[in-house]
Amino acid sequence: MGQKSFLVKRDDLLHKHFSGNKARKFHYFLYNDFPNITTLISHGSNQSNAMYSLSVLAKLKNWNFIYFVDHIPSFLKNNPCGNYKYALQNGMQIIEQKDFDPNKLHIKDSSLFMSEGGALKEAEFGIEILAQEIEEYKKENNITDLKVFLPSGTGTTALFLQKHLSCEVLTCPCVGDSEYLKKQFFVLEHNETFHPTILTPQKKYHFGKLYKEHYLLWEKLKEQTNIEFDLLYDPIGWSTLLHSNIATQNSTILYIHQGGLLGNETMIQRYHHKWKDLAIQPLIKYF
């Protein structure tokens, strides 16, 4: 396969503590005033990027932050690291509750509840701003055939981007499969006109599981672009993109870097604990 160049939107550089797709998703809450709110409540995994971003939001807003998780490993409790560590430093109160059901929560008028991963209607506010930035870049650089790609968890960012962009948005599932991602789209938007194009990964990956080829791809990307990507979503995203027909077309492809780099701290530890011989190998031939 011949050489192919890609553009990268560096949303990881938005702000030192509030960046990436979570900053876009939660921008509505940062931008607007909520005079009656004193507490922010959410839930998810114990190393969630959203958890850390919400802890920053709560700190900026001077809110209490309560976060529910199913389980916290004893090792993590005794050796805080990554998103968990920094969210705690921001004042997060974390509560272990097995089989947590957000529908059973009694939310007071003074509390604001955020669904897991920031899959909410209000996310459209900040993502529309991102779409405007991309449209301006496209116009200023006279790009006639632009395609935007980003890997998805809930698919919220990709969905609202497609709603506000004139070009095609491509994504791939990193949590669950394509059917799961499609269902997530319908939760927020019934009009399929606004649904992004889903690319299916070459093979099925279990979310959060370690794959040696992911780490090697991540290192190769860092070597060839001088950009550090996220180790959880981006290897699946880049692998899917590079092995798709899109990579062979003449379209200009913009890859959105969605941040999440704090999570790399724990991911790198896990990778080196499992494979002590990891080193850069000639994995990609079309960068």
Image (cartoon, rainbow, N blue to C red):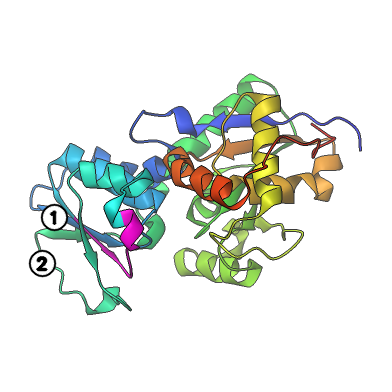
Residue 75 forms part of the magenta stretch: yes
Q: Indicate whether 72 appears above or below 37.
A: below
Q: Secondary structure at mark 2?
A: loop
Query: Going from the N terminus, do you reach mark 2 or mark 1 first?
Result: 1
Residue 166 lies, in percent from the top left, at 62, 42
Q: Which residue is mark 1?
A: 39
The answer to which of 110 and 204 lies nearer the viewer is: 204
Amino acid carrying label 2: it is: Lys
Q: Is residue 63 left or right of residue 186?
A: left
Q: Report the disc number at residue 108.
A: 2
111 over 275 or under it: above or below: below
Disc 1 marks a residue whose amino acid type is: Thr
Please say whether residue 190 is visible from this viewpoint.
no
The stretch in magenta equals 66-76
Image point (72%, 34%), residue name: 280
* Residue furthest top in the image: 140
User: Is 256 covered by the magenta stretch?
Assistant: no
Q: Does any portion of residue 189 appear in the rendered image? A: yes
Residue 4 x/y as whole percent: 82, 31
The crowding category of the residue bearing disc 1, from other C-alpha atoms within 10 Å (few below 14, some 14 to 19, many at least 20), is some
Q: Residue 179, located in which quarter of the rendered image?
A: bottom right
